[in-house]
Image: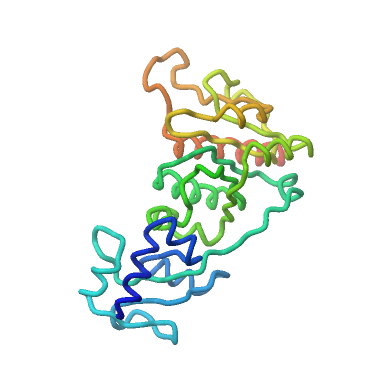
Amino acid sequence: MTKAEIQLIRSLADKRGRTEQGLFLAEGEKLIGELRTSHLRVRRIYALEGLFTGEEVEVVSPREMERISQLKTPSNSVAVVEIPRYRLRPEELRGQLTLALDEVQNPGNLGTIIRLADWFGIREILCSEGTADCFNPKVVQATMGAILRVRVHYTDLAATLAGAVRDGVAVYGTFLEGENLYESRLSPTGIVVMGNEGRGVTPSVAECISRKLFIPPWPADRHGSESLNVAMATGIVCAEFRRQTTLHASK
């Protein structure tokens, strides 16, 4: 590998480098294998001998892999991939269930939420500008390939949600003072807002929420943890939305 190649790869560990280059990193044989059959464009693959073949593949030594891998235990392959550019069409928000993330900052949480969205058939995630970068190497790894199937949009979240409300889209959010999730009639479509790990939903975004939901503890009067991890809460909410959709569709 050349010095310039190593410098480029290392620069992609930072958001500034990814933004300037329009590139992100993916690691591991399974994820890179999925990338090669996806709509994303793989610019270059650096791999140990015998893993991949092709014009974009460069075989590297274990020592070189240690220098370029972003993982604590170096992987066997690293891919340099072009960041996709998605266009958000407001009309697409009317007929589907969408997630919105308001200042979610932990890369592990974001990666898990993208993976959850993929599991529950949610194709679009709206993110505030202060939400973690979905192409952070830690996020990419945590998605376990879901980043290839879920489109993540960074936007002025309050303005986007206000526009959705004007278009008649139901906007849900999780709050301690909300209605019991399991006693609420949920629509099969709409936008579900999940807030920051410590502060919850910001005031400007909260103004756009028409239905406040609460995930009750068990038993209901039990005083335990103050809140749930945002990724865990997202999984619970998405599961209930999909359960009700299936239940009502079968009647």
Which residue is pictured at 50% across the width and 40% down the height? 235
Give x and y (percent) for residue 240. 58, 35
Residue most extreme to the bottom: 55
Left or right for 162, reference 197:
right
Q: Is residue 237 above or below residue 40?
A: above
Q: Would residue 42 appear left or right of 90 to someone viewing this image? A: left
Q: Residue furthest top?
A: 221
The correct choice, above or below, for 48 with respect to 161 in the image is below
Residue ID at (37%, 59%): 13
Q: Residue furthest right?
A: 167
Image quadrant in which the C terminus is located: top right
- Against 153, is 50 above or below? below
- Up the image or down, 163 lies above or below 216; here it is below
Viewer-side residue, 181 vs 46? 46
Q: How is the image coloured?
A: rainbow
Residue 249 % position (x, y):
72, 41
**Who's the residue at 43% across and 55% down the image?**
15
Q: Quadrant of residue 85?
A: bottom right
Q: Position of residue 82 (x, y in %)?
A: 51, 69
Split into 4 quadrants, where in the image is the N terminus? bottom left
Report the number of numbered marks.
Answer: 0
Residue at 68 percent of width and 41 percent of height? 160
The spot of residue 203 in percent (x, y) is 58, 26
- Foreground residue, 31 or 68? 68
